[in-house]
Amino acid sequence: MSALVDIRDLTVRFGGGGRSVHAVNGVSLSVEKGEVLALLGESGSGKSVTLKSILQLLPPKRTKIGGSIRFDGRDVLALKGRALSDFRGGEVSMIFQDPALALDPVYTVGAQIAETVMRHESITREAAMSRALEMLQKVRIPSPERRLKNYPHEMSGGMRQRAMIALALSCNPKLLLADEPTTALDATVQMQVLLLLRNLQREMGMSVIFVTHDIGVAVEIADRVAVMYAGTIVETGTIAEIMKDPRHPYTRGLLAANLHGAVKGARLDAIPGAPPTLEEPPSFCPFAPRCPQARPECRAALPPVVEPGPGRRVACVLEAAPA
Amino acid sequence: MSASEMGLPDKGGPRQPLVIARDLTCHFPVRAGAFGPKKVVRAVDGVSFSIAKGETLGVVGESGCGKSTTARLLIGLTPATGGKIIYDAQELGEELSLRDLRRGVQMVFQDSFASLNPRLTIEESIAFGPKVNGVDAAEARRIARDLLERIGLDPARFAGRYPHELSGGQRQRVNIGRALAMRPRLVILDEAVSALDKSVEAQVLNLLTDLRRDFDLTYMFISHDLNVVRYISDRLMVMYLGEVVEVGPAEALYERQAHPYTAALFSAMPSMDPYARTQVPPLAGDPPNPIDPPSGCRFHTRCPFAEDLCASKKPRAVTLGEGHQVACHMRDPASGHGKAAA
Ligand SMILES: Nc1ncnc2c1ncn2[C@@H]1O[C@H](COP(=O)(O)OP(=O)(O)OP(=O)(O)O)[C@@H](O)[C@H]1O
Ligand SMILES: Nc1ncnc2c1ncn2[C@@H]1O[C@H](COP(=O)(O)OP(=O)(O)O)[C@@H](O)[C@H]1O
Ligand code: SF4
Ligand code: SF4
Ligand SMILES: [Mg+2]
Ligand SMILES: [Mg+2]
């Protein structure tokens, strides 16, 4: 099977104004056709920046990008002009935590979906409108005919999220980039939207990169997980492997901190300290200052990326030389 | 005033609940548009509960159900439109003044930045409350340094820092320290750990557990994360559209939920087992608007067990076991609901 997306050694650095942030520091990952990959990590670990790089959504003047991103064999970092706008929203589209980033407040939901379809396909306004209706039905918005004429603010939070999904999927993308689309929703609504996305993904056979900080959400949606820390991927594996046998000390800490099954009153196994601020790119294991198993060699160089099994990758010295 | 006089002394003894809320209501007048009709948001609508001394009461429910408003009523930040608050056997507005209430109750919010003055060092921020309450400057400073030590921020390194020079987790520690400087007996934590990263959240939860023991605190802990609430709470209160639908011992509620809404909240928790993912959404639709809430049982528009009765008659609270109350016709043998256990 060939990968739909292949990211190699991606680096992203924000500069300007004296201070620089090394947000992404050598990320390599690939997503197969029809696969759902979760990017799991804490805030500031570089998840959103990685996603935005794929669509060139970062401010070009202040951003320095290195490495390569290939989509269906093409170099997407080189796309420009018409080719880039065909790519965005046509082959790859994105949904966000805040639907205001995708939905324009001054147009009705129906008009926005129709507009997007017409931009990417040569069809009449009428056909585009009926596609919009079909999309609202697909995301199971109640009374879809009426909702076509709604402005975003006339919808509830869960419904706006569904409308944004309808817009994103209206041109049948091969890849959906989902940046914490359920994080701001109430628990019962979050689960509705997760199940909807899972069903649509299967039905349409698309690939998804789903960014989340919540391991429970990853379990519900993902086939595979890449765990990010300080702009690097520390561990990759299937969701089942990660849950059953987390190898990297950071992944283990994250799982414990989820409190799933924590005993009331017992002390929590908290990871001490906080993530690094990334003014410098990491020159040794970025987790070393917080790692309970750190050894001198962890602070000497970047840890090796070891493959303990097919499709499994762990960036840690312990993996290279088990104690 | 010396620091030791700042907190409120115990009045009612150990068996007297620290807080009793009776039939609290908070209705906000609103207008739909500039010339729209006048309406009322029933943010809190007849809420009763109590919190025992030394206990942690967890409060859960979807956004807008009235958790924060209830908290603001308890601390006197928002005036109640009805009901009573009895703090350690003294009724607010009668034996107890608002000023005294505020000495006994402190609150920590989700946004760690918003409640800290950016122009004060964190030592000054913590010392501020005691100073305003008449503690002399040197003593206030000593209190602040002791607290910094207690919340895990070495005063030698951190006392002179400003809020923007701290991480989110460190700022939240400062907010907790600032609340404790007032020697409160009740601390309300409104999504206080929700904005923190998981790994940092665990540190702050450990700190809260230690402080509760060392300072004899009582907590009201508001959170949308049921794993966190379970870990920290003794009892759990579940709210829906301004009302309490179920309250009971936390473990009992985790084992068996008596109210269909509580059950839905629990089944919306991710499964954590990739081989047994959630298959059926727990509920359809979003929570309705608290302006014009549904008649009868407010949950009837989303409840899988609703009958005609539920739309017309408000369910009364029935007691199921020690400290366990639920407001659902199904649990009330006298209600006439088809599924009511006789
Ligand atoms: N000052 C106000 N004026 C009008 N309506 C208000 C006011 N404060 C709160 N409300 C409304 O009262 C209801 C309850 O709000 P509250 O903030 O208590 O909810 P909550 O349970 O804390 O929600 P969340 O989980 O989102 O924090 C909401 O519908 C809210 O919009
Ligand atoms: N446009 C930008 N300019 C400067 N810094 C940025 C920009 N976008 C993100 N960053 C920084 O890059 C790092 C990674 O951010 P992000 O990918 O958004 O994290 P997350 O994993 O939470 O999605 C953070 O330190 C963030 O502050
Ligand atoms: S490389 Fe060393 S410091 Fe880094 S995670 Fe592994 S053991 Fe810990
Ligand atoms: S009273 Fe009726 S509608 Fe309300 S929760 Fe019980 S069964 Fe459902
Ligand atoms: Mg992000
Ligand atoms: Mg609130």
Image: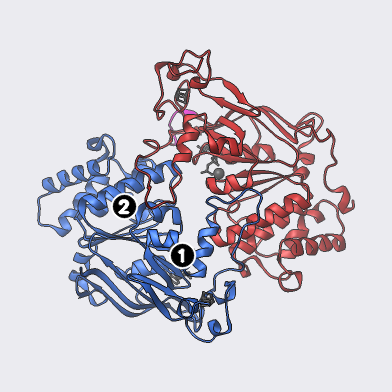
Chain colours: A blue, B red
Pointer 2 with pointer 1, Cβ within 8 A: no
Where ligand 6 lies, by quadrant? top right
In the depicted view, which residue is nearer to us: B115 or B85?
Answer: B85
- Asked where in the image residue B24 lies, by quadrant, the reply is top right
Q: Position of residue A296 (x, y in %)?
A: 58, 84
Q: CA distance from mark 2 to mark 1?
A: 42 Å
The secondary structure type at the circle numbered 2 is loop
Residue at the outermost front position:
A323
Residue A138: x and y, percent?
Answer: 23, 43
Q: Are there few (<14), some (14-19), or many (20+) residues within 10 Å of tag 2?
A: some
Find out if the beta carbon at label 2 lies less than 8 Å from the nearest ligand 2 atom: no
Q: Residues within 10 Å of mark 1 (few under 14, many from 20)?
A: many
Q: Mark 2 = which residue?
A: A104
Q: Is residue B229 left or right of residue A221?
A: right
Bounds of the magenta span? B34-39
Q: Which residue is mark 1?
A: A246
Q: Name the spot of residue B324 as percent of width and height, x first.
A: 61, 29
Secondary structure found at label 1? loop
Q: Is residue A189 above or below residue A206?
A: above
* Circle 2: residue type: Asp
- Callout 1: residue from which chain? A
